[in-house]
Amino acid sequence: MADNTANPRQLRVKLVKSTAGRIARHRACVSGLGLRRMNHSVVVADTPENRGMINKVSYLLQVEEV
């Protein structure tokens, strides 16, 4: 089981552009981050996996550290 104290940093991710008309892999990244609709924001752990998804669809998102 992973210890969450090793990487306590978190990111607030907000979807600011629509996924309509985007390629399927980018829509999958947005849903993988837990975002459902425009202006929806979630807090995710700052892991390499989440950073990769954020970097792939950064043109759709607004990101800030919590």
Image (cartoon, rainbow, N blue to C red):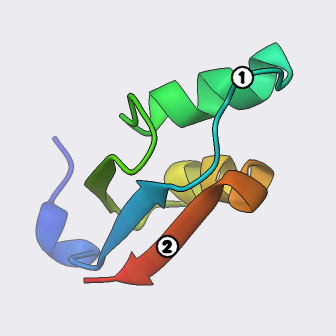
Packing grade of label 2 (10 A; few <14, some 14-19, many >=20) is some
Which residue does the image show at 77% across and 59% down from the upper left?
Answer: 59
Residue neighbourhood size for the residue with mark 1, other residues' Cα within 10 Å, grouped as few (<14), some (14–19), many (≥20): few
Q: Quadrant of residue 51?
A: bottom right
**Above or below, 31 relative to 2:** above
Name which residue type carries label 2: Val
Find residue 47 and report its horizontal and vertical position in percent.
45, 61
Relative side of 12 to 8, left or right: right
**Quadrant into which the N terminus falls:** top left
Q: Vertical placement of 36 versus 41: above or below?
A: above
Q: Position of residue 21 (x, y in %)?
A: 83, 21
Label drawn at residue 51: none
Residue 3 higher or lower than 12, as above or below? above
Label 2 secondary element: strand
The residue under label 1 is: 20
Label 2 to label 1, Cα distance in Å?
Answer: 20 Å
In the image, what residue occupies the spot 72% across and 22% down?
20
**Residue drawn at (38%, 28%) of the image:** 36
Query: 29 or 3: which is nearer to us?
Result: 29
Disc 1 secondary structure class? loop
Q: Nearer the viewer, residue 52 or 65?
A: 65
Q: Quadrant of the C terminus?
A: bottom left
Front tag of 2 and 1: 1
Question: In the image, is 8 to the left or to the right of 34?
Answer: left
54, 41: nearer the viewer: 41
Q: Residue at x 55, y 56 (%)?
A: 16
State the mark number for residue 63.
Answer: 2
Q: Position of residue 42 (x, y in %)?
A: 27, 52
The amino acid pointed to by label 1 is Ala
Side of 33 relative to 30 (left or right): left
Mark 2 or 1, nearer chain start: 1
Q: Using the rendered view, name the quadrant where residue 12 is placed.
A: bottom left
